């Protein structure tokens, strides 16, 4: 499926982590972009952005200061890769915008249809059954607990950086991620197609977390 962009895919693979933001996530986002795209999008811009959108995730994960933003750094790295592979500025610049604007808490909002679709595709991969699996995968990777109860206001104040990153991942948990971030995803989608898919996926996730709460509380 990625044959047309095989050289870019190879370059992207070298940069991707093998966690919840790795190769499989990138392939799913690529597939969702194809699924969400109307006929009049710039396919090259959209699909190249999908392949390259998380190539700076490793740097963000390894940074303890909370200052590395994988969307901003990823756009810079993508520019280099695309220039090396001979792409023109007219493709590279809109790809950079898509990558900078794809992040959940990004300061730069998606302005083009391609950026909106990439943002939607990336969010859809964070919800539903896949979203749950990815959350627990990350929880294991960062030593989180599977369930935590906290005062949300205090938690947000104390454990989130100004640009919205979780400071101490060991004090985070999937249910907090769901409550504080993923529940809002439907309000942050741009395209009608994504909203329809999200409706079904959110219902599944809501059922899952209410069941988890019940089991943790000893009610089931
Ligand atoms: Fe990302
Ligand atoms: Fe992503």
Image (cartoon, rainbow, N blue to C red):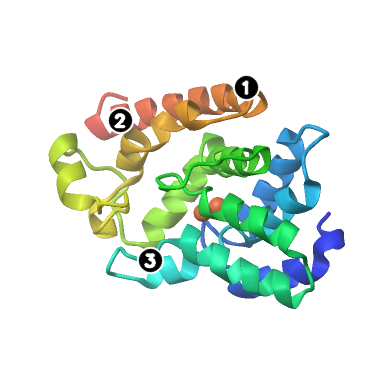
Residue matched to label 3: 68
Q: Is residue 121 above or below residue 207?
A: below
Mark 1: give few (<14), some (14-19) or many (20+) Cα within 10 Å.
few
Q: Is residue 164 left or right of residue 18?
A: left
Which of the 4 quarters of the picture holds residue 142?
A: bottom left
Residue 183 appears at what percent x and percent y? 40, 30
Residue ID at (78%, 53%): 44
Q: How far apart are marks 3 and 1 (CA)?
A: 33 Å
Q: Nearer the viewer, residue 132 or 212?
A: 132
Specify which label sits upstream in the sequence, 2 or 1: 1
Residue ID at (56%, 27%): 198
> What secondary structure is found at the residue carrying circle 1?
helix
Disc number lying in front (3 or 1): 3
Which of the 4 quarters of the picture holds residue 83?
A: bottom right
Residue matched to label 2: 213
Q: In this view, does 125 lie to the left or right of 164?
A: right
Q: Which of 13 and 138 is in front in this view?
A: 13
Rendered image: mark on residue 196: 1
Specify which label sits upstream in the sequence, 3 or 1: 3
Quadrant position of the N terminus in the picture: bottom right
Specify which label sits upstream in the sequence, 3 or 2: 3
């Amino acid at each position: 499926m990625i044959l047309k962009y095989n050289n870019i895919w190879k370059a992207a693979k070298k940069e991707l982590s093998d966690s919840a933001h790795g190769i499989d996530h990138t392939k799913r986002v690529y597939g969702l972009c194809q699924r969400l795209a109307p006929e009049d999008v710039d396919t090259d811009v959209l699909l190249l952005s999908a392949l390259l959108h998380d190539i700076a995730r490793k740097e963000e994960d390894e940074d303890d200061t909370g200052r590395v933003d994988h969307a901003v750094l990823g756009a810079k790295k993508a520019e280099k890769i695309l220039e090396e592979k001979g792409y023109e500025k007219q493709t590279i610049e809109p790809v950079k915008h898509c990558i900078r604007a794809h992040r959940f808490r990004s300061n730069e909002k998606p302005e083009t249809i391609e950026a909106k679709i990439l943002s939607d595709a990336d969010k859809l991969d964070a919800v539903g059954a896949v979203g749950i699996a990815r959350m627990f995968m990350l929880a294991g990777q960062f030593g989180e607990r599977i369930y935590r109860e906290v005062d949300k206001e205090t938690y947000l104040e104390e454990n989130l950086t100004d640009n919205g990153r979780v400071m101490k991942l060991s004090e985070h948990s999937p249910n907090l991620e769901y409550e504080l971030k993923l529940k809002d995803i439907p309000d942050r989608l741009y395209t009608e197609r994504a909203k329809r898919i999200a409706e079904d996926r959110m219902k599944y996730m809501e059922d899952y977390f209410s069941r988890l709460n019940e089991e943790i509380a000893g009610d089931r």
